[in-house]
């Protein structure tokens, strides 16, 4: 699985690139804001973005700020033409930019298609369902970004769990455990006809999934399966990753890429038994062994 770093912070990017584990980077307007704020607003993105692109060995995703097809195409071409001479660039286009009820929900998809036809690699972002991912692949996206963490938040909140009280932002959400809890509830209440049981169970579990998807990891798994079924070339780029266990799950699911924040990369390297092991190995070094290295 390729690892992209999910940040616009140049120091974090440089540090992680030195570890030899970075294949690309993803930014979004919020990550750019964080980088700008950290520097007291004293950066010019025209100079700052090339610095990022020059350090990262693979594609750096840059997001458009418009919501209409024409402006998104223009902005994407601008970003691509301005920055791709420094290294690899992908342009992030939201799958559906429509906010108003009854508005045009296909501005994003049409933009993906136009850019793909022009040979500009698109990272189709803000994906929350396998069907959105299917449409993005058909329109020619190079990457699809399912937002695993944010989908976990959505499902947990729909279940009545309170963010900051019942779960923290970076907590792993075990949707399989939730399914087991739901089954136990169904078994406890079991009475009535099959039809009644089905209707009650379906009602009872409705809040636990989003159109049949129980959590972010499952979202990634389903998209990987659908793409494999039909040989789509679009790469699954698991995004909105909040913890190391999610990274493990999306890697197991066969995600082509995971874009990982700096704090989660740090979590991935740590294990208390590794610390214990290095302490005991260090304590056991006998003088004869140290002597050997003096011959270097
Ligand atoms: C990257 O492509 C996404 O924009 C990012 O992973 C979103 O992460 P968040 O949900 O933690 O903000």
Image (tube, rainbow, N blue to C red):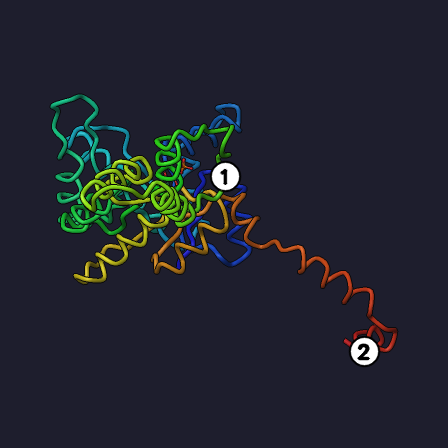
Quarter of the rendering containing residue 32: top left
Q: Is residue 81 visible?
A: no
Residue toward you, 180 or 82 = 180
Mark 1: secondary structure: loop
Q: Position of residue 93 (x, y in %)?
A: 24, 38
Q: Residue at point 72% right, 63% down? A: 277
At a point 49% along the width and 32% down the height, the residue shown is 166
Q: Quadrant of residue 276?
A: bottom right
Crowd rating for badge 2 (residues with CA inside 10 Å; few <14, some 14–19, many 20+): few
Tell me the crowding category of disc 1: few under 14, some 14 to 19, or many 20 or more residues within 10 angstroms, Cα based: few
Q: Quadrant of the N terminus?
A: bottom left
Which secondary structure lies at badge 2?
A: helix
- Provide residue 98's location: percent of width, then percent of height: 19, 27
Tell me: is circle 1 under 8 Å from ligand 1: no
Residue 170, numbered label: 1
Q: Horizontal and vertical percent for residue 143?
A: 27, 50
Q: How far across and how far down the image is residue 293, in percent?
A: 79, 74
Residue 8 position by quadrant:
top left
Q: Nearer the viewer, residue 99 or 128?
A: 128
Q: Residue at x 37, y 43 (%)?
A: 182
* Residue corresponding to mark 2: 292
Residue 2 appears left or right of 19 = left
Lower sequence index among marks 1 and 2? 1
């Amino acid at each position: 699985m390729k690892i992209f770093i999910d940040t616009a912070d140049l120091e974090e990017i440089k540090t992680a690139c030195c570890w030899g584990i970075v294949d690309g980077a993803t930014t979004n307007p919020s990550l750019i804001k964080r980088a700008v704020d950290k520097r007291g607003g004293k950066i010019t993105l025209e100079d700052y973005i090339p610095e990022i692109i020059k350090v990262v060995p693979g594609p750096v995703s840059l997001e458009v700020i418009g919501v209409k097809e024409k402006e998104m195409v223009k902005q994407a071409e601008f970003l691509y033409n301005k920055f791709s001479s420094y290294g690899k660039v992908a342009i992030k286009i939201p799958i559906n930019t429509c906010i108003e009820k009854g508005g045009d929900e296909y501005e994003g998809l049409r933009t993906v298609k136009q850019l793909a036809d022009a040979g500009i690699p698109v990272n189709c972002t803000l994906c929350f369902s396998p069907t959105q991912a299917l449409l993005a692949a058909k329109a020619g996206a190079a990457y699809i970004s399912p937002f695993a963490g944010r989908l976990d938040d959505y499902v947990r909140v729909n279940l009545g769990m309170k963010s900051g009280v019942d779960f923290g932002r970076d907590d792993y959400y075990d949707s399989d455990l939730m399914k087991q809890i739901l089954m136990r509830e169904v078994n406890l209440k079991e009475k009535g006809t099959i039809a009644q049981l089905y209707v009650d169970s379906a009602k009872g579990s409705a809040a636990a999934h989003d159109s049949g998807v129980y959590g972010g990891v499952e979202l990634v798994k389903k998209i990987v399966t659908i793409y494999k079924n039909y040989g789509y070339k679009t790469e699954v780029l698991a995004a909105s990753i909040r913890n190391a266990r999610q990274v493990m799950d999306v890697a197991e699911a066969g995600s082509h890429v995971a874009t990982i924040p700096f704090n989660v990369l740090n979590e991935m390297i740590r294990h208390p038994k590794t610390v214990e092991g290095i302490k005991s190995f260090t304590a056991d070094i006998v003088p004869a062994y140290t002597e050997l290295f003096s011959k270097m």
